[in-house]
Image: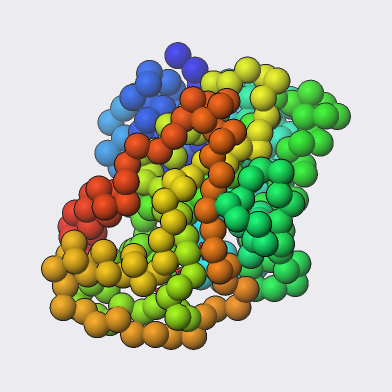
């Protein structure tokens, strides 16, 4: 049994990760400041004596004895991370420093939840880990993108300078049950709009693309990355290469919900990337991982979840 700290553990991805780690027979400490996470995401785990919740902000130092740290604390949807951009940068950067300092002190292995946003609005397609990205450092997404890029730099340098055992995963758009219904992300927005019979809001012409992975596939990739030997630190892309336009996504959601909602077009937010698709050659080779859940199947599971909260 390992003792594992999950920062951001009450969020969408963190709650699934806590659940999986407990099911695998570990002791899990879930740390969260509940900015975008919710206690109800992990309430079903509270009966488990090997699960603990701690209210804490990662921008402040934190001390605990654990074997592994998964660092997920950070708002992830554009409306949430742009709500207080300075705080988002502090969470990514000071949060990484505090968690890396902790990992160094207690000799824990630490995994950073990085993002495909480090590639910005990419000029190569699909994106490989060797691509350096195309990010506007003063744009509205910079607080998140540059925060995550700086966190990667911190991780790599704690590894080089202090031999901290690190892992960097670059997560591509992930969806599934327990996404926040008001987080403004495209999957949750479209499903809520469809279920409530409201207009489906496509930003821009809807021809921009994203590659959507179902949450269970991501969690499997995270666990496999953490289990790799100390010589493999990443970064490694984990995402589903299936690429769809936002129009295609809207049409699928209308079909699967049987909704009568109409599609409407609204202005495209600034610096919105035109396309995104992971090259997962490295994940296949190093993690023996590839996604198993196709978009149609994952959307149906996610719609079933949203039906329980969309009244
Ligand atoms: P989320 O907003 O549901 O979860 C983030 C969690 O971090 C929340 O529980 C929030 O309360 C907590 N948090 C935020 N700031 C904090 C702070 N200062 N101290 C402590 N806790 C704090 O988002 P998510 O989709 O679950 O994303 C989790 C991680 O994965 C994030 O780091 C995000 O950048 C990364 N990621 C997610 C996606 C995706 O598609 N969901 C894609 C790429 C990367
Ligand atoms: N989007 C949209 N309608 C919405 C919400 C988002 O058309 O109601 C678009 C958004 O402009 C972007 C894509 O969907 O092009 C994915 O947006 P999301 O915020 O989910 O993720 P990210 O842009 O960070 O990949």
Counting from the top left corner in percent of width and height, residue 185 is at 43, 65
| In front of the other: 126 or 132 | 126
In the rendered view, how is the structure colored? rainbow
Q: Residue drawn 36% across and 79% down?
A: 201
Counting from the top left corner in percent of width and height, residue 290 is at 44, 34
Q: Residue drawn 67% across and 19% down?
A: 230
Q: Is residue 201 above or below residue 195?
A: below
Taking the image as shown, residue 190 lies to the left or right of residue 27, namely: left
Q: Residue drawn 44% across and 56% down?
A: 243
Residue 35 visible to an observer of this rendering: no
Quadrant (top left/top right/bottom left/bottom right) for the C terminus: bottom left
Q: Residue furthest front?
A: 125
Q: Is residue 126 above or below residue 190?
A: above
Q: Residue furthest right?
A: 161
| In front of the other: 101 or 117 | 117
Q: Residue drawn 42% across and 51% down?
A: 242
Q: Quadrant of residue 137?
A: bottom right
């Amino acid at each position: 049994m390992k003792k594992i700290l999950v920062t951001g553990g009450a969020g969408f991805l963190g709650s699934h990760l806590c659940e999986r780690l407990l099911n695998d027979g570990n002791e899990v400490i879930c740390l969260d400041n509940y900015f975008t996470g919710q206690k109800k995401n992990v309430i079903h785990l509270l009966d488990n004596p090997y699960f603990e919740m701690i209210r804490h902000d990662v921008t402040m130092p934190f001390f605990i004895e654990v074997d592994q740290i998964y660092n997920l604390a950070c708002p992830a949807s554009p409306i949430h991370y742009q709500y207080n951009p300075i705080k988002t940068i502090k969470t990514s950067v000071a949060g990484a420093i505090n968690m890396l300092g902790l990992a160094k002190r207690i000799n824990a292995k630490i995994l950073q939840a990085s993002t495909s946003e480090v590639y910005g609005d990419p000029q190569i397609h699909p994106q490989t880990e060797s691509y350096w990205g195309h990010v506007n450092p003063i744009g509205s997404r910079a607080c998140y993108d540059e925060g995550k890029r700086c966190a990667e730099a911190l991780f790599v340098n704690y590894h080089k300078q202090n031999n901290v055992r690190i892992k960097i995963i670059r997560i591509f758009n992930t969806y599934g049950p327990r996404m926040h219904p008001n987080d403004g992300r495209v999957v949750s927005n479209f499903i809520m709009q469809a279920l409530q019979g409201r207009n489906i809001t496509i930003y821009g012409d809807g021809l921009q693309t994203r590659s959507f992975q179902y949450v269970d596939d991501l969690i499997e990739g995270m666990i496999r990355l953490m289990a790799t030997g100390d010589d493999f630190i990443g970064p490694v892309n984990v995402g589903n290469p299936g690429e769809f336009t936002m129009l295609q996504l809207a049409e699928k959601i209308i079909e699967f919900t049987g909704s009568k909602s109409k599609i409407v077009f609204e202005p495209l937010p600034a610096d919105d990337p035109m396309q995104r698709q992971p090259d997962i050659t490295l994940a296949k080779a190093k993690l023996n991982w590839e996604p198993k859940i196709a978009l149609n199947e994952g959307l149906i599971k996610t719609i079933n979840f949203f039906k329980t909260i969309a009244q």
